[in-house]
Amino acid sequence: MPGKLFIVPTPVGNLEDMTFRAVTVLREADLILAEDTRTSSVLLHRYDIHGELRSHHKFNEHQTVEIIKERILAGANVALISDAGTPGISDPGFLLVRTCAAEGIEVQTLPGATAAIPAIVSSGLPCDRFCFEGFLPQKKGRQTILKELSTEPRTMIFYESPYRLVKTLAQMAEFFGAERRCSVAREISKIHEEHKRGTLAEVRAWYEEHEPKGEIVIVVEGAVPSKGNRKEEKDRGEGDSQA
């Protein structure tokens, strides 16, 4: 019988955010694939997990995915983790999942930590409908994407490096408007967790004076609909409530 591939989320900050099921799966796995074995070893040691550990990251996944697939087909249960959060969400994982799915291998993804959801829920911006954009391209295509998103009506979520945060906020102010509301979440679930809310101009000014550090999530308000679209949304909402 073939084994299974388990996608296991890991804490984005506080190590106690691990689920009971995640610990059990990792303890019972025949092989654990980690984005960075040094980072993951700290977590595994914390929960007394001592299984076989190998690296699986964006620089080697094309070379190793077939080997992993064959091992699962031979009966091994393999668990994939990333440095933090859910594998596949701005982290390695998609290629392995696609390969296993195409082969008919069962893929089980455990619910768990991801930085995007705490950031948008804490932002104070609408979170009933949103779009996740992950990391913007550093160079080619960056301005094109921002221009396209300038009319996006849903709340938008971005991941960003602290070293590029001020520049990104400035570019967003240029394309979305300096008065567009936003929230920057930093170090989610860690000791120094911080949420800065305001307009793009205000939050940019704050971080120009206070150097950002740690993991960053930017949440930006969607475009305000035109008068005609606002009426359509109101009519749609009234129809939903009547239903």
Image (tube, rainbow, N blue to C red):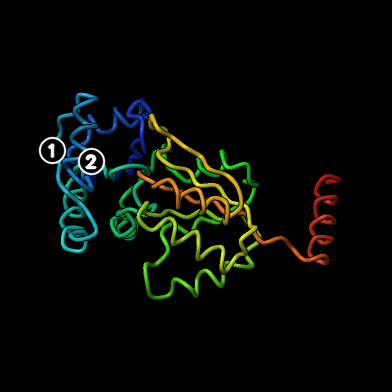
Q: Position of residue 210 (x, y in %)?
A: 43, 45
Dot 2: element: loop
User: Residue furthest toward the front?
Assistant: 209
- Give the amino acid at mark 2: Asn
Nearer-the-camera pick, 27 or 232:
232
Which residue: 20% across, 52% down?
Answer: 56
Circle nearer the viewer, 1 or 2: 1
**Looking at the picture, does residue 146 appear above or below residue 61?**
below
Q: Going by the image, does 234 lie left or right of 202?
A: right
Q: Position of residue 148 (x, y in %)?
A: 56, 72
Question: Sequence-wise, which precedes: disc 1 or disc 2?
Answer: 1
Residue 220 image label? none
Q: Quadrant of the N terminus?
A: top left
Would you name the residue on which mark 2 appears? Answer: 77
Q: Can residue 201 be seen in this view?
A: yes
Say which quarter of the image contains residue 136. bottom left
Would you name the residue on which mark 1 appears? Answer: 52
Nearer-the-camera pick, 190 or 209:
209
Which residue: 33% across, 40% down?
Answer: 8
Which residue: 32% across, 42% down?
Answer: 84
Which residue: 66% across, 61% down?
Answer: 223
- Give the amino acid at mark 1: Glu
Dot 1: element: loop
